[in-house]
Amino acid sequence: MGWRRTDCLSKPLSAFFEKLGSTVGSCPLYFFVIPIFISAALGGGFVFIRDREDNDLERQFTPTKGPSKVTRAFVRENFPCDDSMFSEDRLYHKGMYASIIAVSTINNNVLESSFFEDLIQLNNNILNITVDNGRLGFNELCAKTNGECVSNIILDIIGSAKANGTSIAYPEHVHKSTSVFLGFVLGGVDTDLKSTVRSAKAVRLYYYLDDHESTAEVTKMWLRRFKALLSDEVDTEHLDVSYFTSKSKQEEIDSHTTDGFPLFAITYASAITISVLSCLRSDNVRNKVWVAIFGVVSCGLAVISSFGLLLYIGVPFVITVANSPFLILGIGLNNMFIMVADWQHSHVTDPVSKRMAHTYKEAVMSITITALTDVLKFFIGVTSDFPSVQSFCLYTATSVIFCYIYTITFFGAFMALNGRREASNRHWFTCMKIPSDKADNQSDINICCVGGNYDKTTGAEKKQQVSNFFKDYYGPFLIRPWVKGVVILLFVAYLTASVFGCFYIKQGIELYDLAAKNSHVTAFNIKDREYFSDYGPSVMVIVKEEFPYWDNVKRGELRGCIQDYTRLQFVDRDIFTSWLDSYLAYGEEKHLNLNDKDVFLTNLPQFFYTFPFLKQDVNLTGDVIHASRFLIQTVNISDAKQEVAMLRSLQSITDRCQVAPLLFFNHEFIFFDQYDVVVSSTIKNVGVITAVMLFVSLLLIPNPICALLVTCSIGSVTVGVTGLMSLWHISLDSISMIIFTVCIGFTVDFSAHMSYAFVTSKKPSADGKAVDALSSLGYPILQGALSTVIGMSVLSMSEFHTFRTFFKIFFLVMFIGMVHGLAFIPVMLTICMRSSDKKERKEEVMTISKF
């Protein structure tokens, strides 16, 4: 069996940790005080937290090298916005604007006179908002076309229809000889067979503002005044109004930081309470109340030190980082319970230094395995395509390092100090010496004044009833042959159901999920999805190189490619803007031979003079058309899943066109790029975690079979969590990807601890090793899982999707990981190791027979 062992590092490391434990036990004060001073010094970095905050949606939550960012750069260069001819469909950025969605509370029809009158009044109130001491209003700050503000034409259309008794066509209506698209401004529309509007449930108004740097500050002031106006209750019984500004999402994201700190405090207070309750002992000397408290304090010091250090050196503080303290709490609590369990197994009569040496030799080695894999995993995560993931991984990796260091110094030192108290048989609260046995004449009331008993047979502390349960009942029950069979069947059923659920996992994120559940952003976007999902974003289709538009054959092939887009199920073939088709119609009307290059190019300026908006769709320099674009209208985009399907459909047509290189773009696609990256990044991250875990396990766990089982548990938990995520309505997006990857890496702690305890057990048989491992670590694993999950349950009540998602995934991971650690892994180990032992004995018999 020696040739199979891979413990080339575990033996020397165990010896090193044994010496370290002895040193900490001999001089605990130094190891206790120094981390406090370090934390106090590094904690000063928190004064820079406001300066380091960076929650810019695009910069942090979209892929750094997303294809839409490259396309936007091309659009910005070739089709710069014309400030005098504002066009929403042609923007390469979201712009500066405010918007309202008004829903009728009467008959669900916005065409009712009472609703329309109230809407006109609200619109007038908005237009009357002024800033800069009343000098600047909407008319001075608005985006303009031909010198006039871009207005809400829908109000004129409805007013004209009411005044003249005319009908409104949908989705395109001719108003003052101009075709107007109403898909974005009328929602919940009911039409007759002639596409005439019979009723509409909602109307949306836009207030576009100038986006120049010179007016940026006053524009922001106007948006704040707009928000203040709409934040007050709208004084009407006919309108249900929701509002939104181009700055709203960013403001909601920024508020995550302030929301996170109270949750952090509540969670840590809950964790302390639960840890203390789980560490309570009836023995007044062996009570571990203060150990539990300082175990949580150690986690807090690790967060303070790591965050402060990174804030000092200028690392951005992103909203995703707010999840890191909760993760560190889980890791720290798990480490604490493991160390306490090993301390209790040491001989009570031994000196504190020897007991600490025993504890460090057994516990710290196991803790090192998980800490090393966590650190490597997070540092590899710094290479992610998402800056928010990079910041999170950097903060968390640094926190794990400090958590590990403080566990073996600060927390270990306090265990030694507490051990000295126990060695002197002092009361856990008063620190007064008390007798170990109750005198015969002592009343039961004074039972609180005795303590210090231990198991005289083993020389160790008396185990709690829960620990005895794992040793005397659960362990022996689990190793019965028929129970193992049931566990294997349950494992197969679990994997089967999980794989089935994986096929139904949803992908994509609703951007309003980054806002608070009850915020105006969420209310606005829910109404947007409910009433205006019939029409999605307007998409630019771009010819990115020079093209002979005058060549009849190639022009026909290009028009065929463009028409292929309009045939997609997500595109309305009747709503289409083509400068080329309009120019051909213009040439036919003017009797021009547009198949001639000179005629084609010579008449373009006059055409653009007649149709000035279309001039923005052609990059014409001299007699060369460097690039041009067409506009198509998407439809029926009601959720993130359909956004993914739309992108893939558009990409398939783009790749298929051979006549010219094409691009497609809408500024919202900057956020949609995450869909292609999220799945690949998640798979890559899980693969990296698996490889790292296998490598570290082979080095530090003295048995390759155990190392392989620990690694396989990652795949099992990954499949299980993914399948259950679909049942709990959790989508796979950039936020859940971070949490999912982090938690998956964390759950191997249970399997690693159990496997290491199994392989280092002195019991001769595999079944005996399993019972011994469960006796030693069953209760600490249960403590760590339950205390962390219960402590983090406060996150489920958060107003923010990020924290709620963290709790859901963390709960799934902890529960599934705990089941693996307490049931699946022990059973698998007994089966695999028994087969291995039989094979080894057979080889030994054959070797002896040869001699």
Image (tube, rainbow, N blue to C red):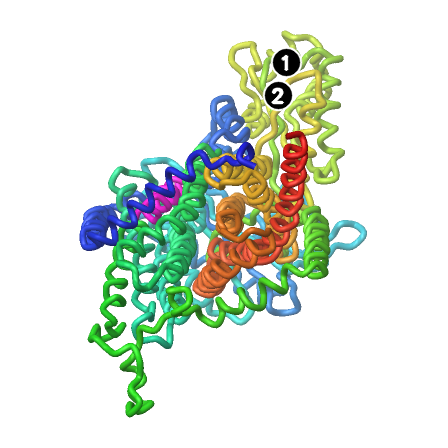
The label number, if any, that marks residue 543 in the structure image: 2
Asked whether residue 402 is drawn in magenta, I would say yes
Q: Can residue 633 be seen at all in this image of the molecule? A: no
| Side of 428 where 163 appears, left or right | right
Secondary structure, magenta segment, majority class? helix
The label number, if any, that marks residue 517 in the structure image: none
Assess whether mark 1 and mark 2 are in contact (beta carbons under 8 angstroms): yes
Q: What stretch is highlighted in magenta?
A: 391-405
Instruction: Locate residue 351, reporting x and y percent.
Output: 26, 58
Instruction: Locate residue 234, reporting x and y percent.
Output: 46, 66
Q: Residues within 10 Å of mark 2 (few under 14, many from 20)?
A: many
The residue located at (58%, 19%) in the rendering is: 544
Identify residue for label 1: 547
Q: Residues within 10 Å of mark 1 (few under 14, many from 20)?
A: some
Q: Can residue 687 be seen at all in this image of the molecule? A: yes
The residue located at (30%, 43%) in the rendering is: 52
The residue located at (53%, 71%) in the rendering is: 237
Q: 243 or 328, which lies in front? A: 328
* Disc 2/disc 1 C-alpha distance (Å): 8 Å
The residue under label 1 is which amino acid type? Phe
